[in-house]
Image (cartoon, helix red, strand yellow):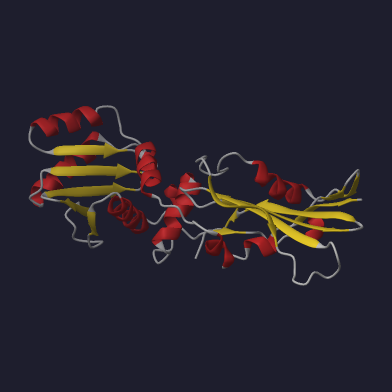
Amino acid sequence: MSIWTYPDVASHEFPYAVKGMVVRMGSSEGKRLVNLWNEPACPFCKEGLFEVVAEHDREITASPPPWPDHHDFYSANIEACPACGWWKAQYIKRWTNPGGICTDVHQGGASLKELDLTNISAPIAEVRDYITARYEGRLSLHPRLFEEVVGSVFSDLGYSAVVTAYSGDDGIDVILTSGSDTIGVQVKRYKNKISVEQIRSLAGALVLNGLTRGIFVTTSTFEAGAHSTADRLGHAGYRIELLDAPRFYDALHLSQRKMYRSWEDFESLQVIAKLPLVRHLMEH
């Protein structure tokens, strides 16, 4: 499954032109979708794009050709975001014959599906992609779903992660292990700032669970004094790292993987088949 789709927009909504004359102006939405091809970076999470497919002037002429001197070519380019998986694509078909050269240009970019962030059964991979693309969605996540996302991110960063039972966790939501280290993670999906008292509460949870290292992950930020409190607890033998919304977003980016690596990865999405015809040229 994917959080990305090509929208079901009628063909007459897209701009369509022949050389020297505009035949159809298209709608503003059609133009927006076509213009996505010109985006130098992901329009959602602003990550740089990578090239998945680049095939130029590949000859696909039938053998034997329909008539003498007839040749068919296509070019295809697909670029995708390595963080959230957004993509843009262009397909150009060109055929030549004694009467001239015809060129059809199809292009566009993906649109974001809506995802129910309160549904705790939503696939974690899709949730991660979604909040990478639209990070403000983290504030709508079901708290349990956010705990699962946090565990998944740390797992991809090289930790062994176990999300604890939703109740009776003694203040520890995720337990991380790396070698001989065990870390207790507290996860808070909050809009307001995390207080100093909540940092002390995590320290107490570490004591109850026999741990000396902790990480506090929040969808918001920390109050003034939170970092100095964490420093004092560190000197007392309880090292606590604070991850606010921007720092967790950085970790989320680092843990993401390239979704698409080849033309075949796109075949199931039927990307090329759905791209609108945006330009038709006839040269004699």
**Identity of the residue drawn at 35% across and 38% down:** 247
Residue 169 found in image quarter: bottom left
Q: Which residue occupies the foreground of this view, 18 or 171?
A: 18
Residue at left offset 69%, top offset 50%:
33
| Quarter where residue 111 is shown | bottom right
Q: Is residue 10 visible?
A: no
Q: Nearer the viewer, residue 181 or 107?
A: 107
In the image, 129: left or right of 76?
A: left
Q: Residue 10, relative to residue 45: is it above or below?
A: below
- Tell me where residue 5 sits by quadrant: bottom right
- Is residue 38 positioned above or below 78 on the image? above
Foreground residue, 231 or 37? 37
Q: Position of residue 245 (x, y in %)?
A: 37, 40
Residue 139 to residue 270: above or below: above
Q: Position of residue 155 (x, y in %)?
A: 28, 54
Q: Is residue 105 left or right of residue 5?
A: right
Residue 118 rendering spot, x and y as whole percentages: 44, 60
Question: Residue 117: percent from the left, percent from the top?
Answer: 45, 58
Q: Is residue 227 visible?
A: yes
- Seen in the image, is 90 located left or right of residue 67? left
Q: On screen, 242 above or below 85?
A: above
Residue at 26 percent of width and 37 percent of height: 242
Look at 76% across and 61% down and name the residue there.
Answer: 72
Please state if 91 lies on the left or on the right of 136 as rendered.
right
